Amino acid sequence: MAHEMNDDLTVFFDGGCPLCSREIAHYRRLKALESISWVDIIREPSRLDRFDLDPRVALAAFHVWDDSAARMYTGAAAFVRLWSSLPGYRWLARCITKLHLTPLLELVYRRFARRHFLKRCREGACSA
């Protein structure tokens, strides 16, 4: 699928989640190596269409689209991809990658993501 993006990365986040919003606000203040488009999936669900990304799927896990690689990263791999472009986090991304820790990080992330998703659905965020 061809994506018409001018940004190297597109980060999809749950803007209705206070924790998620604070984390993304922190990342946005950093000077990234790539240009980054930030998509609040709650406020801009139509922007998911171009990536064939279902809103519930987007809410269930963190997603980062890498335009230069034409690849969608999800979960822990999405965080590692984002961190690799951010000052103060590149060392962490390199360490996780070199030590092959992404699968372990994914196990931890899945536990958080599942609880977060269920909580957000109870709050009505999963409604169409």
Image (spheres, rainbow, N blue to C red):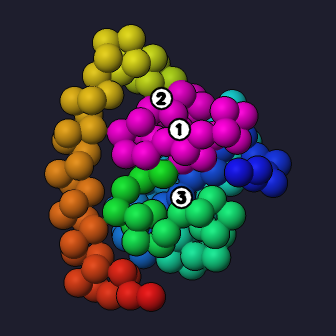
Q: Return the x and y of residue 107 as percentages of the image width and height.
A: 20, 39
| Figure check: 35 above or below 58 | above
Q: Does residue 74 appear to the left or right of 65 in the view shown?
A: left
Disc 2 residue type (three-letter): Tyr
Disc 3 residue type (three-letter): Phe
Q: Give the range drawn in magenta.
A: 64-88
Q: Report, in whole angstroms, how far the alpha carbon at label 3 lies from the one at label 1.
A: 11 Å
Mark sitting earlier along the chain (2/1): 1
Number of numbered discs on residues? 3
Q: Does residue 100 appear to the left or right of 62 in the view shown?
A: left
User: Mark number for residue 89?
Assistant: 2
Which is in the foreground here, disc 2 or disc 1?
1
Instruction: Find numbered disc 1 in the image and state the secondary structure of the residue it sits on.
Output: helix
Instruction: Find numbered disc 3 in the image and state the secondary structure of the residue it sits on.
Output: strand
Location of mark 1 (residue)? 82
Mark sitting earlier along the chain (2/3): 3
Question: Magenta stretch containing residue 121, yes or no?
Answer: no
Task: Classify 10 Å Cα crowding around label 1: few (below 14), some (14-19), many (20 and above).
Answer: many
Residue sitting at x 45%, y 63%: 58
Instruction: State yes or no: discs 2 and 1 in contact (Cβ < 8 Å).
Output: yes
Question: Magenta stretch containing residue 71, yes or no?
Answer: yes
User: Mark number for residue 12?
Assistant: 3
Which is in the foreground here, disc 2 or disc 3?
3
